[in-house]
Image (cartoon, helix red, strand yellow):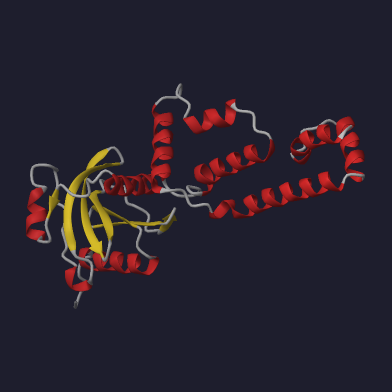
Amino acid sequence: MNHDEAAKLLGPYRDGELDLATCLKLEEHMADCPSCQLKLAGEQEIVDLIQSETPRFKASPFLKTRIQASLREEKSSTSTIPWWKRLLLGSTFSGLAGATAMLVILAVGFFSTQGIPELDQEAVANHVRSLQVNHLMDVASTDQHTVKPWFAGKLNYSPQVIDLTSSGYPLVGGRLDVLDGQNVAAIVYGRRKHFINLFIWPSNGRALPSHPYALNGYHVLGWTEGGMNYLAVSELGEQEFEDFAKLIQDQTSPARPGE
């Protein structure tokens, strides 16, 4: 086996794609070829680096919403296969480029959503989309007495609108949105240059688990109080986001005896 032939087989050799006879010939060549040894070691080092960094890969909000849209399409039609699955099933990956593409797809499609309820993923996608398409608010107002009446006639319930300006989370408006297949109220708050979407809708006996999640740099927390579901989403830091949720929870919880 000459040097040019060996160089072409280094990628398949590293990926375990060669038969035993070819492996033996290639290893015999590499024993006397420092150049091939260095090239193989360098490529393996890059692959190891990619694999070690993959779990911390952070997809852009645009890519995240594209992939979630593909997943929703798959659920609505079993005959339609999302683009990322077609890529995995129909393409032949070889060498470093193939390994990189595979790892990136797995990082976005698996690690970023593992263990996170679909409703929370949908809420994050709605939050991102509201910022991208400039549809953060249908009614822009810092007055809770303006935002709350705006929903009258648009929903069959009246969402509670709380003013947190004095606590550093000013009300900036509200809009209609769709979550879990139904129309919901989205109350929007600000914090410096960030926004918080607070989705509110009747629980109808389906309480939300009060458990925080982090998804690609976004925080999401849901809870149920007084027959209403609340689901907050923001890219705020964890502590500020938890402070906001606590403020809302304190004002939506029924007062205890003696308070």
Residue sitting farthest toward the bottom:
258
Q: Position of residue 238 (x, y in %)?
A: 39, 65
Residue found at the far top of this picture: 79
Between residue 159 and residue 166, name the one nearer to us.
Answer: 166
Query: Residue 23: x percent and y percent?
Result: 86, 35
Residue beneath the point at 7% across and 52% down: 149
Residue at image position (11%, 57%) is 141
Query: Where in the figure is residue 25, as x and y percent of width and height?
Result: 90, 34
Within the image, what quadrant is residue 247 found in?
bottom left
Q: Tell whether 214 sits left or right of 232.
A: right
Expressed as whole percent of the image width and height from the top left, the position of residue 134 reads: 23, 46
Q: Give 193 or 10, whichever is nearer the viewer.
A: 10
Placement of 90 over or under 160, stated as above or below: above
Q: Residue at x 56, y 42 (%)?
A: 106
Q: How many marks?
A: 0
Vertical comparison of 51 with 189: above or below: above
Q: Residue at x 9, y 49 (%)?
A: 150
- Quadrant for the N terminus, please: top right
Q: In the rendered view, would you say 139 is above or below 17? A: below
Q: Quadrant of the C terminus?
A: bottom left
Say whether residue 99 is left or right of residue 153.
right
Name the residue nearer the viewer: 96 or 77: 96
Q: Is residue 181 left or right of residue 156?
A: right
